[in-house]
Image: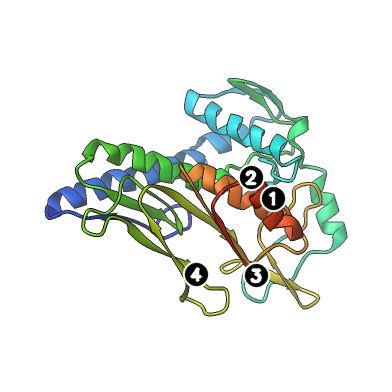
Amino acid sequence: MAMASPCEVLCQCEDERLARTMTQHAAQEAWRIEEKYSRYRVDGVIHAINNAQGSAVVLDAETVRLIDYGAQLWQLSEGRFDLTSGVLRRAWRFDPGSRPPTREQVAAILTGVGWSRVQWTPPSLRMPVGMELDLGGIGKEYAVDRAVELLDAWREVPALVNFGGDLRTSGPAPATGSWKVGIESVAADGQAARVVELTSGALATSGDTRRHVVIDGVRHGHILDARTGWPPSGAPRTVTVAAATCSLAGTYSTLDMLQGAEAEVFLQAEGVRHWCLR
């Protein structure tokens, strides 16, 4: 377990000791990233940023790259994706039986959301007092990519890294030539709506099959539009995207969910391989 998700590494080889060594390397990298960037830890980078009380924090090169990426997503999404929107979790709960917040509750929390108010001059970052940074929207996909990069040292043993359903392969499975990955059905829990044969690259999925809330009889997923503080209207149940890296696949799937009813149009315009389930 890492990043609140079950994580696995699939290796196809005859050397069990080698497979366990590869898996341990991937696990250690996942735990390293979780320790460094989890908002729940008091010894990580995010805690230091969020508790700087308005002072500037000078960041290391890895963190600079991640925050730069998040800033680019804010621009590309026209503010729908925002690294400062994690505070909305104070109003929203997506556990079974959860009740949605009131408009007033969301509006009050939105006063603390807005990347445009952050002073970002790499490697220095200054957050206004009361605002928080949250890398949860990009951290897991980044961890998958980092794990695969580490496993590339064993090029003769292709592997598939799967962290909570976001996955990437370091090469095709030698026995069959591809990894068979199921896209979960939204109609039947645990059943595959489609099987994708993956020879290279990554898949990432965003949707409401695991975390959602029902508002006036309508099911809404946990992905929130940072401009409004509410789930986008008319979004698909799930969006799965194939791309060269897990970070890129996750970017497309998340930004697509934020398009709401225009999700299919967005991905078609981007020209990426995708599967939208409603």
Upstream in sequence: badge 2 or badge 4: 4
Name the mark on residue 270.
Answer: 2
How crowded pointer 4 is (Cα within 10 Å; few <14, some 14-19, many 20+) is rated as many
Upstream in sequence: badge 3 or badge 2: 2
Front tag of 3 and 2:
2
Give the Cα separation between the discs numbered 3 and 2. 20 Å
Q: How many marks?
A: 4
Upstream in sequence: badge 1 or badge 3: 1
Nearer to the camera, 219 or 4: 219
Which residue is rendered at x = 54% and y = 24% of the image? 59
**Identity of the amino acid at label 2?**
Glu
**Identity of the amino acid at label 1?**
Phe
Residue 40 seen anywhere in this rendered image of the structure: no
Position of residue 124 measured from the top left corner of the image (x, y, whole percent): 62, 20
Name the mark on residue 278.
Answer: 3
Name the mark on residue 266.
Answer: 1
Do residues under tags 2 and 1 come within 8 Å of each other at their CB atoms? yes
Q: Secondary structure at mark 4?
A: strand
Do residues under tags 3 and 4 come within 8 Å of each other at their CB atoms? no
**Identity of the amino acid at label 4?**
Glu
Front tag of 1 and 4:
1
Q: Secondary structure at mark 1?
A: helix
The C terminus is located in which quarter? bottom right
Give the residue pinned by disc 4.
184
